[in-house]
Image (cartoon, grey):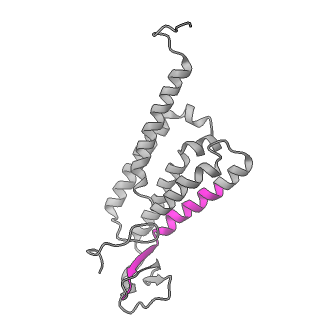
Amino acid sequence: MAQIAPDVKTASVEGLKTTQEVTQKTVTGLGNLVKLLPSGTFFLFVFLNPALTNNGECRTSNKYLTAIFLALCGFACCFSWFTDSYTDKNGKIQYGIVTNKGLYPLSGSDTSSVNLSAYKLRPGDFTHAFLSLIVFAIVALLDPNTVNCFYPSFETTQKQLIMALPPVVGVVASSAFVVFPNKRHGLGFPPREASEKS
């Protein structure tokens, strides 16, 4: 059997190693951004995106289904910031939609023990919704299956952007989340701890 000289490297092996390094750095950066997303929406994306994109080998129908799915997930990311939860007098967690007047309950439970007007809409809700949408867009649009489905040549030609974008967006979003701290525990977020309940 013929041996290949150890100092000879094929271009395809080098390209594969570089692609794997870029992918690993991108996944690490995206992992930090995911903390800013509603968990239910993110897990739904992680589980369904490979099936809808046919693991990145899209046909036209896959592209339409994936685009609709990404739009719905983006809407869910935004909408979840306009929801909140409270504990009713029976100790059950109830959810509602945040409005200018307070919380609009989604269930018909007794709200006499809770001051729903304390859950009014705030400017930070819009900031969180917008940044959550941006973070989701970065996570979704840089996902390898999405990249291969919608713009397959992007991964090889724009490696610098793929590596730099998640940390930059993460810094901007994290800074805004510090300026506008989140006190909501709506749909897709963990419920309030006992010490947080008012």
State the quadrant of the N terminus.
Answer: top right
Q: Residue at x 56, y 6 (%)?
A: 2
Q: Up-down: is 82 above or below 148?
A: below
Q: Up-down: is 78 above or below 3?
A: below
Residue stretch rendered in magenta on the structure: 67-89
Residue 80 within the segment the image draws in magenta? yes
Q: Up-down: is 24 above or below 89?
A: above
In the displayed structure image, the side of residue 195 where residue 125 appears, left or right: right
Q: Residue at x 50, y 57 (%)?
A: 43
Q: Position of residue 15 (x, y in %)?
A: 53, 24
Residue at the outermost front position: 1
Q: Position of residue 6 (x, y in %)?
A: 46, 10
Q: Main secondary structure of the magenta part?
A: helix
Q: Residue at x 68, y 55 (%)?
A: 65
Q: Up-down: is 8 above or below 64?
A: above
Residue at the outermost right position: 60
121 or 42: nearer the viewer = 42
Residue 173 within the segment the image draws in magenta? no
Q: Position of residue 125 (x, y in %)?
A: 42, 69
Q: Position of residue 182 (x, y in %)?
A: 35, 67
